[in-house]
Amino acid sequence: MDNLPDNRADIKDFLATRRAKLLPEQVGLPAGSRRRVPGLRREEVAVLAGVSTEWYARLEKGNISGVSDDVLSSVARALQLSEEERTYLFELAKAARPRNRVAPRRKDGELAAPVQWMVDTMTMSAAFVRNGRLDVVGSNPLARALHAPMFASETTTAHGHANFARYHFLDPASRDFFVDWEAGAAATAALLRAEAGREPNDRDLRELVGELSTVSPEFRALWGSHDIRFRHDGIKRLQHPVVGYLELTYQSLALPTLPRAVNELSVYTAEPGTVHEEHIKLLTSWAATTATW
């Protein structure tokens, strides 16, 4: 057990950053003129949560093991956490409990054949399956054509598989490919931060975060903000090297697998009757005549 990662630093940073974002006037307290740091003081959060200042200070140092769900709920309300942030706090607490710190390491096997068949039948949608580390573990031809710059990137060829985070932060060409690069970077870091809360024993994830933090100052700053994201859907705007500008909607669905891994199926589609649908049709034809990545 001594070799297992300790998530107390994650707990400490998460609670501290949430407290710093909450203004006194948002909770009905006077702003005052002698605040040395932004946000609420620890004692103010303690009062709002109905616990002692000493107890909350201990919690914010990362000592969350054994804390009841009712108390965590009170802290979540005091900090006005969003639904995703509240879920993340409970994930951190679950991971800190002794019986969970010896959980078997997650295994990432090959994509089940029926799932790959389903993905392959989506001929007018770009579909791919990724794990929590944002590794691409399965895709259809249109998805590989849509993300051709990523699949051809050295960040992919050097590791034997595509990873959205590596491409986004470590390949300068991603800034041309992703029209909303900054928003995508924030979402990518937040997805990895949420996964780190769920899977603190994932050595590959920690190595990925270490690599990104070392090489990319943008990732390092976003990781330090401790923002999290579980849901992954919305509008994606891309500047594709073959068909040009694309604006697509994307949705993600969880695909639970055994023994513990949870992959996500992401589907990119164009609005019917738009120029983006025509571009997708062109890309489909291009994919059919291009070598598989």
Image (cartoon, rainbow, N blue to C red):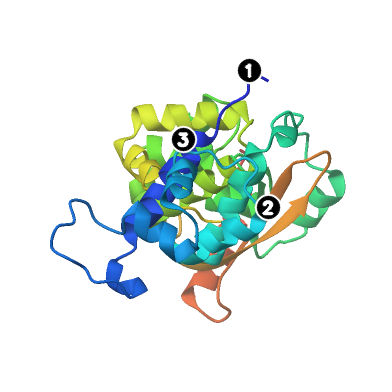
Q: Amino acid at mark 1?
A: Asp
Residue 126 at least partly seen: yes
Residue displayed at 80% across by 56% down: 118
Q: Earlier in the sequence, mark 3 or mark 1?
A: 1
Residue displayed at 35% across by 37% down: 220
Q: Earlier in the sequence, mark 2 or mark 3?
A: 3
Q: Amino acid at mark 3?
A: Ala
Q: Are marks 3 and 1 in contact (CB under 8 Å)?
A: no
Q: Which mark is residue 10?
A: none
Residue 237 in the image, given as x and y percentages of width and height: 43, 63
Q: Earlier in the sequence, mark 1 or mark 2?
A: 1
Q: As displayed, is residue 27 above or below residue 293?
A: below
Callout 3 environment at 10 Å: few (<14), some (14 to 19), or many (20+)? few
Q: As displayed, is residue 202 above or below residue 44?
A: above
Question: Which mark is nearer the camera, 1 or 2?
Answer: 1
Q: CA distance from mark 2 to mark 3?
A: 28 Å
Residue 47 in the image, given as x and y percentages of width and height: 42, 62
Quarter of the figure with residue 66: top right
Q: Quadrant of the C terminus?
A: top right
Task: From the image, tell me which residue sits under label 3.
Answer: 9
Task: From the image, tell me which residue sits under label 2.
Answer: 264
- Local SS, label 3: helix
Q: CA distance from mark 3 to mark 1?
A: 16 Å
Q: Which mark is residue 2?
A: 1
Q: Amino acid at mark 2?
A: Glu
In the visual, does 88 lie left or right of 9? right
